[in-house]
Image (cartoon, rainbow, N blue to C red):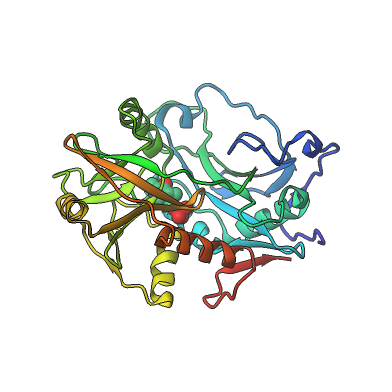
């Protein structure tokens, strides 16, 4: 692949860490590739973007991101097919979303040409880190932080946009047990739930740790005002299958508009599976669990693709969901992976080849 960039300056790493990485035994998000993408916003403008060796950076303790959490991020993946071609999946969605998130946190929008040139340059330099094989990928983490060294409580005047990359392995997702939120909330009307704001995650760690003490891996968040509607899981959107109908909550300012979620809604239509996008009462799902019509619950997001849910608890009532062999979870996971890895037809033009 040729490196020819109009706008991005490139400094190639003199050494590579790749031989020290055990690709058969990867811990998600712990190993990073040889390069990173960096672009600073100074004097009201994004400066020349750079791809450079992955390295630590230093900021003054007063940098605003440390105090006010002015930070947003994205999560996406690059895939390699058996002929060595590299693909992204619907990357324009991630580009649009990071700017939506940035706007909500009073941060400047990042230019589209810098985003795509930076991403592609990085993927060409770190191409060897993208392993072929169904489910293997390179996880990409674009993010923006407020860097200005000043602790007055107002938006910063300087920012840094970055992309770092971490190899990820196909892994079997053991079904998870979830607790339905009754007291804590992830997001509220008029808040930042729709944004991939760093603070949304920080605020979930404590209630999730309480759920973990009770033997659950995740929380399913409900609406903040009544706790009667099911909204989404910690890092995933959620789908419910009642008989042969899928149901997922509509997006709103409280719910993240996931790329995986919207792709599943489209694939359901393609596959002739009825999918309803509507509000879902906790009581409706409990009733369905009791009468046996609740067949599946699963989470959907870029990192795990699809995570089947095997049990949920609400108001001290525990419901087990039988995990079946011919599940929608399996079907949608395989259908998505086949598109992402260039194995099946891509009738919606979701693949984006990095040439
Ligand atoms: C990122 C994220 C998702 C999943 O979004 P994808 O675009 O499918 O990866 C769902 N919920 C929350 C809260 C998220 O942050």
Camera-nearest residue between 17 and 271: 271
Q: Is residue 355 visible?
A: yes
Measuring from the top left, give residue 115's x and y in whole percent: 61, 56
Residue at 49% from the left image edge and 39% from the top image edge: 157
Measuring from the top left, give residue 139's x and y in whole percent: 60, 48
Residue at 31% from the left image edge and 31% from the top image edge: 211
Q: Which quarter of the picture shows residue 234?
A: top left
Q: Which quarter of the picture shows residue 261?
A: bottom left
Taking 52 as reference, is 326 above or below it? below
Camera-nearest residue between 243 and 95: 243
Residue at 65% from the left image edge and 30% from the top image edge: 57
Q: Is residue 101 visible?
A: no
Measuring from the top left, give residue 171's x and y in whole percent: 57, 46
Which quarter shows the C terminus?
bottom right
Left or right: where 276 falls relative to 162:
left
Measuring from the top left, give residue 290's x and y in whole percent: 17, 51
């Amino acid at each position: 692949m040729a490196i020819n960039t109009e706008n991005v300056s490139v400094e190639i790493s003199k050494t590579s860490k790749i031989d020290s990485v055990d690709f058969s035994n990867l811990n998600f998000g712990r190993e990073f590739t040889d390069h990173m993408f960096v672009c600073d916003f100074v004097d009201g403008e994004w400066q020349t973007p750079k791809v450079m060796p992955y390295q630590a950076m230093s900021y003054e303790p007063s940098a605003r991101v440390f105090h006010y959490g002015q930070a947003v991020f994205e999560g996406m993946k690059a895939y390699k097919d058996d002929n060595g071609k590299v693909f992204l999946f619907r990357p324009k969605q991630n580009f649009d979303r990071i700017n939506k998130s940035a706007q909500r946190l009073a941060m400047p929008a990042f230019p589209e040409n810098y985003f795509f040139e930076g991403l592609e340059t990085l993927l060409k330099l770190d191409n060897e880190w993208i392993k072929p094989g169904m489910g293997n990928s390179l996880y990409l983490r674009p993010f923006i932080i407020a860097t200005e060294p000043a602790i007055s409580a107002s938006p910063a005047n300087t920012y840094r946009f970055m992309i770092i990359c971490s190899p990820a392995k196909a892994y079997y997702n053991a079904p998870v047990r979830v607790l339905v939120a009754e007291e804590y909330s992830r997001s509220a009307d008029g808040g930042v739930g729709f944004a991939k704001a760093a603070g949304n995650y920080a605020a979930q760690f404590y209630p999730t740790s309480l759920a973990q003490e009770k033997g659950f891996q995740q929380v399913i968040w409900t609406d903040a005002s009544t706790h009667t509607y099911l909204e989404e899981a910690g890092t995933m959107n959620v789908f419910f299958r009642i008989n042969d109908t899928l149901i997922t909550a509509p997006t709103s300012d409280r719910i993240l508009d996931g790329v995986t979620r919207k792709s599943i809604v489209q694939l359901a239509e393609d596959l002739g599976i009825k999918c309803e996008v509507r509000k879902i009462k906790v009581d409706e799902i409990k009733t369905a669990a009791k009468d046996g019509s609740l067949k599946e619950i699963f989470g959907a997001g870029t990192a795990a693709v699809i995570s089947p849910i095997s049990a949920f608890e609400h108001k001290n009532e525990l419901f087990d969901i039988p995990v079946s062999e011919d599940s929608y979870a399996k079907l949608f996971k395989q259908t998505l992976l086949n598109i992402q890895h260039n194995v099946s037809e891509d009738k919606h033009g979701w693949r984006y080849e990095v040439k």
